[in-house]
């Protein structure tokens, strides 16, 4: 499976905003949910401009291990995100991606079953 849709969505997260693994998985309807989103983020290619640091665990928790946890915290704080005890206030910083709904079928587009 290609993680490109995951990385494209993560690139849309604005500075100063974050997204959780669960919300990322829900927005893309990833099979395996938040764990799949976590695997995708763990495989993020370097040098591609993907803001991996804006993706957090449930309830805004930084889940990755050191030394990357400190780097994630510094990057978030440099964007104006307040991190207290390895947590981000999701009420203040959570980004909600616009989810495209499926187009409604019109009478001319409906398939007639026999």
Image: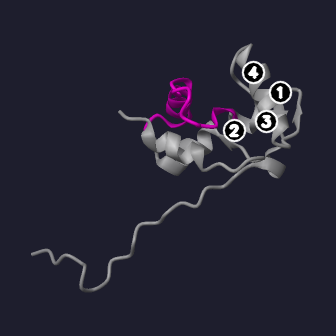
In percent of width and height, residue 21 lies at 61, 37
Q: Are marks 1 and 4 in contact (CB under 8 Å)?
A: yes
Residue 54 is labelled as 2
Residue under label 4: 69
Distance CA(mark 1)–CA(mark 4): 8 Å
The range drawn in magenta is 31-54
Numbered disc in front, either 1 or 4: 4
Work out whether 100 lies above or below 27: below
Disc 4, SS: helix
Q: Earlier in the sequence, mark 2 or mark 4?
A: 2
Distance CA(mark 2)–CA(mark 4): 12 Å
Q: Earlier in the sequence, mark 3 or mark 2?
A: 2
Q: Are marks 2 and 4 in contact (CB under 8 Å)?
A: no
Residue 46 is labelled as none
In this rendering, position of residue 51 left or right of residue 92? left
Residue under label 3: 76
Q: Are marks 4 and 3 in contact (CB under 8 Å)?
A: no
Distance CA(mark 4)–CA(mark 3): 11 Å
Q: Are marks 1 and 2 in contact (CB under 8 Å)?
A: no
């Amino acid at each position: 499976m290609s993680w490109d849709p995951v990385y494209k969505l993560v690139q849309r997260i604005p500075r100063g905003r974050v997204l959780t693994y669960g919300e990322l998985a829900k927005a893309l309807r990833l099979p395996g949910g938040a764990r799949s989103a976590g695997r995708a983020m763990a495989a993020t290619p370097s040098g591609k401009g993907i803001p991996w640091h804006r993706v957090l665990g449930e309830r805004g928790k930084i889940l990755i291990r050191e030394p990357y946890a400190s780097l994630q915290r510094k990057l978030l704080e440099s964007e104006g995100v307040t991190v207290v005890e390895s947590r981000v206030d999701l009420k203040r910083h959570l980004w909600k991606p616009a989810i495209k709904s499926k187009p409604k079928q019109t009478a001319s587009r409906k398939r007639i079953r026999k």
